[in-house]
Amino acid sequence: MSDTRISEEAEIKPVDAAPQPVYLKDYQPPAFRVTHVELKFDLVPAATRVTAVLHLERHPDGAPGQPLVLDGERLSLKRIAIDGQELGESEYRVDDASLTIPDAPDRLRLETEVEIDPASNTALEGLYLSNGMFCTQCEAQGFRRITFYPDRPDVMATFSTTVIGDSASLPVLLSNGNPVERGELPYGRHFVTWEDPHPKPSYLFALVAGKLEKVEDRFTTMSGREVTLQLWVEPANLEKTDHAMRSLKAAMEWDETTYGREYDLDLFMIVAVDDFNMGAMENKGLNIFNSAAVLTHPQTATDAAFQRVEGVVAHEYFHNWSGNRVTCRDWFQLSLKEGFTVFRDQSFSADMNSAPVKRIEDVSFLRTAQFAEDAGPTAHPVQPDHYIEISNFYTLTIYEKGAEIVRMLRNLLGWETFRKGSDLYFERFDGQAVTIEDFAGCMAEVSGLDLDQFMRWYSQAGTPEIDAHGEYDYARAEYHLTLRQRTPATPGQPDKLPLHIPVRVGLVGTKSGEDLTLTLDGEALGKEGVLHLREEEQTFVFTDVAEAPVPSLLRGFSAPVKLRFPYGREDLAFLLTHDSDGFNRWDAGQRLAMLALDDLIAAHRNGVEKVMDARVVEAFRGLLNEPADDKAVLAEMLTLPSEAYIAEQQPVVDVDAIHAAREFVRQSLATVLRDDFMALYRANRSEAPYAPSAEQIASRRLKNVALAYLMSIEDEEAIELARQQFEADHNMTDVRAALTLLVHSSRSAVADPLLRAFGKKWAHDPLVMDQWFSLQVTRPQADALDRVKYLMEHPAFSLKNPNRVRALIGAFAGQNRVNFHRLDGEGYRLLADVVIALNTLNPEIAARIITPLTRWQRYDETRQSLMKAELERIRAEELSPNVYEVVEKALAE
Ligand code: TRP
Ligand code: ZN
């Protein structure tokens, strides 16, 4: 087991001591800084040589006399010299995590040569091979697996990189910046030298070498700079690049018009690789993408995949400013770049597509996945104060909750002022490595707002809960709204302070059905206003309220909280039709469905006959019959809360009751409204050539939502329509929707031949096979787990590829709740076996895929003990720091 600390204790710790945490409070500026680096790679699969020349000098803020300590893991040192002088054995020390030179001069040119083994790198950190192609992943701490270096984001240097490789097998040699020299070498080899003029931390270093082909385009920036855009892929994937290139140009233009940010090199490259731990990586001038997050084709990618590509391409591009030009001082500041960049990509996608639907999707994701994280054993603040393994902190809290905090700032300041704060931040800190406080400081400075209390959003973990109560006083024409906030305890944070929570509200008149004009403390607010909840409890008194209102609370999801209000079903049905806030109209529908689901879950548990709530039926009938002005929103309104969301609302999760209740609602609605759903399906069919446009996506979504209802009752006509939709083979969205519904039905006679045909047709395309894996293992029938085991033996599956693992194991454990939580514990055992195998192969993925097991506290006692037993079985292994940290937290008392 390796320890990644750069500290004194690292040397005296016992060999197999448990990994120790790093603390934010211990931050020290680096002892040395690097002004320039020259790297030379001699690429050979199992024995690559890396020569590094580091131009080092003592940091002005560093304590004098400190030794020079460089990070380095799994490196075999071949040579070391200072200013041209080879060092003797006594002049340096190397252990499994670092290289120490006790008596380094104040300024030096350090040259090292190391050998590394990309061919056996299954962790996919550092330099590795993917389909015969060399590529790198250095964030967060992968660069130390390439060469000895102060591998921390506050050390920024200019890089000059020479890549040498075999001309035949590695015709393309890429790195950051601009190519400045290339040439032939003896023995059929060649080289390219790249220079990146922008100082950057090592985590943004990238290298790619392989048999790649490119598509090229151009972009002229607002100041007239001509930028060459290149997308590098394996030759077979050239036809899957259009959408990513279009998205890139749209993102470049959007960042200019929205944030005034322009690209700063002559070349911008994206490379698609098959083996990748995350979605993509923003390396300077050379973004590396998981092929799943960049390649699309109407026949192979769904609408959701097209939209994901658009979002991820934009996200990585936006990092060029929010991340690269201005970077993080240390990894506790990770949300500085990720929260802001997610907020930016969410805004971009909202502008490119349906803004209300984008908001609904983002909030749904936050409320299920991030809220669950915040309520579990790995809950942590958006600015954590300690960690053992930083790669475990690329979480929904850092990304999604971090983005919500930036969104609240945008709303508190208003766009114009927020934009001024953003300009100030980029100008003031350009080329620097800074903190979350630096970012917030700019926002406070331009607005004059006191953000002290607001900053608790960064330091306190857990999802705040608001209990709201309202009372209408007819005699006085007043509405009294009381809000009480509380943030539950999280590991290491038993007591919480009140947060500054912006609550956007409207009062909808029950007679008029319109937003009433709000007057609060004598101040006219207009048709809606923002309440600033700062105390534990506050009462807001609205005056001149002419009619009894229903309050519309937390409009647009103005803060990432759980808000409870004792709405009656009538109130919710009323808001569903009358709320002027699109988000809250949708949320009223979700709340109404939740009330019905709660009753049905109770009925199921008590063995009582289930009765469908007539109000929900009528609400759906209304939705189906009212002319749809926004099809995309309608599709969302017709979608029931997911099993994961329902589970979040239960004190003890009963997976079977949730599944049964939700199925009952689906089937009841389908039975009563069968003809309406059929009409909706037919009205939204189209023969038009595929385009990933907002309109087409909305129609397809609506059509497939209707088909899903009809398939839930296995309507004969619907089965035939699904079969036809599959056979028509118009686009992957429709094909996959039809195949999924058939495979998830009991009609194997219809589904099986189609499933086989699909598997055969796409055997050559791993991204399609991933969909084929996922849709089978998410089927609710009892054979799902056997299918997982069977498919793990399929030639297209490999534990070494993260996309395959997510498609098969991740989909089963995360989405097939009834089967993962089988009472014989087989689902848990399967996941634990996979975690144990991945712990050695790929610790980052192992520590992620384990998540469902860590949520054991949420289930009944039988399941709790089964899950804990599997966690303990994992704990007994020799663990990577990644899995160690997660398992220890999950099993902590
Ligand atoms: N910075 C990347 C992003 O959000 C995240 C990332 C890509 C990453 N690959 C990684 C993080 C590997 C940790 C490990 O855009
Ligand atoms: Zn990012």
Image (spheres, rainbow, N blue to C red):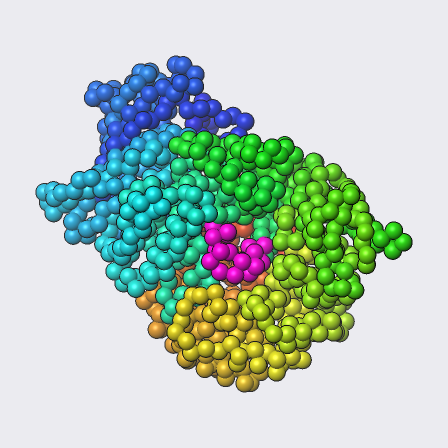
Q: Which quadrant, please, contains the C terminus?
A: top right
The stretch in magenta equals 345-363
Q: Specify the principal SS of the magenta part.
A: helix
What is the x, y in percent for residue 111? 25, 27
Of residues 821 and 217, which is closer to you in this image? 217
Spot the residue most to the top.
65
Q: Is residue 609 above or below residue 372?
A: below
Q: Is residue 384 left or right of residue 765?
A: right
What is the x, y in percent for residue 404? 57, 46
Q: Is residue 691 above or below residue 254?
A: below
Q: Quadrant of residue 237?
A: bottom left
Q: Quadrant of residue 301?
A: bottom left
Q: Is residue 703 left or right of residue 493?
A: left
Confirm whether residue 867 shows in the render: no
Q: Is residue 171 left or right of residue 64?
A: left
Q: Residue at x 58, y 52 (%)?
A: 366
Q: Residue at x 61, y 50 (%)?
A: 371
Confirm whether residue 426 shows in the render: yes
What is the x, y in percent for residue 174? 25, 45
Spot the residue most to the right.
475
Q: Residue at x 24, y 23 (%)?
A: 81
Of residues 343 and 183, which is closer to you in this image? 343
What is the x, y in percent for residue 751? 47, 78
Q: Is residue 49 covered in magenta?
A: no
